[in-house]
Image: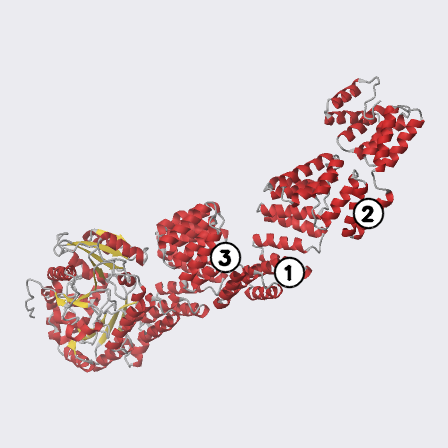
Amino acid sequence: MNANALPAVPLDAELQQAITEHQAGRFAEAEELYLAILQAHPYHAIANHNMGLLAGQVGQYEAGLPYLHKALSVNPDEGQFWLSYADGLLKAGEREQALEIVTSAIARGLDNEQSQGLRSRIETAIASTPTAQETQHVIELYQAGHHAELEVASHALTQRYPDSDFAWSVLGTALQLQGKDAFEALQKTVQLAPNDAEAHGNLGTAWQERGMYAQAVASYTRALELNPDFVEAHGNLAAALQAQGKLEQAEQAYRQALALRPDYAKGHFNLGNTLQLMQRSAEAIACYQRALALLPGDAEIYLNLGNAQLDLKQWQAAIVSYRAVLQLAPRTKAAHANLAAALHEAGEYESAVKICQSGIILHADDAKLHNNLGRAFQWMGKAEEAIAAYEQAIALDGDFPQALSNLGLLQCKQKNYAAAIEYCTRAYHLQPDDGPASAQLAIAYGAAEDRDNALKYFQQAVDMAPENAAMHKHLGDYYNNIKRFEQAVAPYRQAIKYEPDNSETHNNLGVVLQELKAYDEAIAAYARALELNPKNTSALINRGSTQQAQNQIELAKQSYLAALAIDPKFDRAHFALGNCHVIMNEPLLALECYHKTLAINPDYRDAYVNISATFSNIGRIDEAIETCRKGLAVCPLWETLFSNYLFLLSHSANIDAETLFAEHQRFSDTFEKRVAKIPRGHDNTRDPLRTLKVGFVSGDLLNHPVPHFLIPILENIADGARLSLYAYHNNPQNDDITERLREVIPHWRQVEHLSDPDLGQLIRDDGIDILIDLSGHTGKNRLLMFAAKPAPVQASWIGYPLTTGLQAIDYYLSDQYFTPPDELGSQFSEKLMLLPACVPFLPSELAPSIEPAPVLANGYITFGSFNRTNKINRQVIARWARVLRAVPDSKMIVAAMPKSEAPPQLATWFAEEGIAPERLTFEGRTSMAQFMAIHHRIDICLDAFPYCGSTTTLHALWMGVPTLTTAGPTMPSRAGNMIMRQVELDDFIATDEEDFVRKSVSMAANPMLLGAYRFSMRHRLERSILGKPKLITEGLENGLRMAWQRWCEGLPPVSFEAPVAVPNPPIGL
């Protein structure tokens, strides 16, 4: 008879099948069959007995005892049942009861070798097991928390009972509770009790503490094989799997533990941690909240809940969670740092600063707190405090990449580019495989205008993190910033691929598509941005800008108003609405919008430009100039505003020539030295006779006065024999004039999207020999590109009647009447290249035939003006009013106004001078044909000052109308003088205001002479050099050749008169 033997009795087929499966070791199949028998026959002795044995064979000794006991109860005469029950009690640790059972069996006559052997084993086990008193003693020590004493007592038990698994297990527990190495004790426990699930679980914990996760997983797995309902073993197995990076398996193990014990708070918490690692923050939050429902005062759970909320940008919820942590555990470092981060993201910067500062009082050595303090200070605009905080964080932890990159990026904003690159480089080297670190270094290089390194590290960031949308967006943003719009499109589309719901990226894509004139695609991009975020005010502004570019002015206005409805203090929206009012000829409303912009943001640079331009356009030049000065006080290194300031100064009657020149020189002093010159000399071949590559740079190669002067010359340049022409058009707009220019300039470049360095490189790549600026200090100029000297010879011409001030521009092209060298040469930093005439005149094809002077039919003189409004200042109106008073029956037509009515400012000024409104007629801007026809109603034009008319003066002459002008001390004040002298009408040039009035009276008194002059004007123009573009072209070609030859010979520029073969004969009446 064997203690674990199956009884040999006649069996029915079902029982026989169960025993067969049992003996074959197919325990699961056998268990199923036994249980089926017991469900039908609960008191089936053999089935109960065998089920008890099977439970013990899989280590479930306690679970098997009820079956063994029932078998014995049903059939106490079966000796095997006595032995099996006693053996089960022994293995279940019930040694005293096991001895009672085997002793009873022997007393009943079951006295044989098996029963005596079993009794001997039981007695040995009892002898090697601590007594009940000893056991109770260690239990009491454990419950009292006397862990050191527990260790001593349990160690004594292992000496007294070396084969007691209980003694070794308690010793292992005592050591673990004290943080000591319990490994050997727990291994010994498993050796003595190989079927003890708890022992395997404890050993797994020991393996895990040693970082040996594979062995820990094996121990937990064995524990669960012995006891599948061992909740703690499921939880510990999950932790070990998580440590191995097997997050999905860890999740399943935690879920199994929670299925067994739904109120297992630690399980909910740890499952939340696993889900957080799997970036499933929303599910993690639900787990943390369930854990808090079970453990409402647990600070660690609140901390991790806050972290998950922070990841989901639930700033306010995270703030609540972190504050709860600090209430429960005020010294928690992470809570201070993370609460500061959440407050920072929520825009509560002052609160963030206070939390950091209170945290630093408790944890002065916490670099993270100092870093977060720096971030809060930075967003409050306290750069010095932010820098100090970042530096302290780095002092505490020199290898803290976030603090290093934060300090580097802040140094970028402070324009300390060397320091920015240094800090970002240190951060990058700490994380050489981290895409964001590479992108931050790229930002630093980009700010320092080191494009090669910026693009290198932006691209590296994309390569490191190809599925990180932010890296693609950084690259797109950089291409956008350096005006490489075509190259920006692909990175933005990649960013959208990986993050399709990012409203800002769709908005930025729209911006570059707009720049590329893909207006419909841009509108679609803005629509998607607004679909994702209806409150994206930037997308509304950009959509309006695109609609404006499509001449959908009312739609644009509605977009701007929609942005303001969302954010009434959005500076860009006020500014954009102001631009809309300008287009709609509503200057006073525009000024109101621009001033609101500055009230919100005094550093909004473009507002200063547009306010000054708007004041200028309504003749309020002094206010325009003062606005520029205010803007330059805010932004002293803004070249666009400085150029506008110089342009406006040229219109002011309150500035002398010396000051005007000094201010232009100040432009050079301020900006030219900041522009990096080309790193080596020019490579152009020094051949004085070869065909020259001549480039023209302008933003006005469209329907503008500049092309009307330029086209007659370009059409007369021999087809590439002496000059090869290039155009660099700095304006996205093109029209029929642009197309006409493209026909005569073989090499055309659209460059409005190119930065100054890129444009300079293009010019060098084209091999330009002589580069000519056609803008000066007017809009869309590229003077800072000229300052880098991309071409060996550089000049300025036509677009601006003053010096550029730049040392890098060698020549200014003019003529002896417009710029007499003895009088005006000292007002130019350039040397003067004097042509036969500064420009030729191209009559409009729409000009009608000349009609008789209207005075002959009207009986009174009609004066006129076609000057733009920014030339008509208060002093001009005063001079014109003196003429009108001196010729009492005269009238005046003021044309080319924004509207067909008196501009409010001009009407006020005329009224102040006592000029009755009925003597004045105001004509709005109109078509060229109608513009020319207005001249039929005018006898004499009155010029403005100190910025005289030029194009309008020539058009008037072509229509038979002379202009009464003065010759001032600057080039802008001599345009009329130049024209009238070229056509030999010196009688119309006054020496001063008194002479101006006197001549107007004299001319008005001689209508017949005016009539004679009228029909001679076209002849005069055609016979003058102004009407001989071939002669001017010859002078230009010869002048450029002479300048080139001097460069070839290594000689500096000098002023000279360009030679021509045939002088101009007198015109005569």
Tell me how far mark 2 sits from mark 1, CA to CA. Answer: 40 Å
Secondary structure under tag 1 reads helix
Q: Relative to 103, is 649 on the left or the right? A: left
Secondary structure under tag 2 reads helix
Q: Which mark is residue 139?
A: 2
Secondary structure under tag 3 reads loop
Q: Which mark is residue 184?
A: none
Q: Of residues 77 and 609, which is closer to you in this image?
A: 77
Mark 3 lies on residue:
535
Q: Of residues 546 and 910, which is closer to you in this image?
A: 546
What type is the residue that disc 2 sits on? Ile
Q: Pointer 3 and pointer 1: residues touching (CB < 8 Å)?
A: no
Q: Position of residue 463 (x, y in %)?
A: 43, 46
Q: Is residue 465 visible?
A: yes
Mark 1 lies on residue:
323
Please name the residue shown 84% across and 46% down the image. Answer: 136
Task: Decide: few, some or many residues near mark 1? Use Cα within 10 Å; few <14, some 14-19, many ≥20.
Answer: some
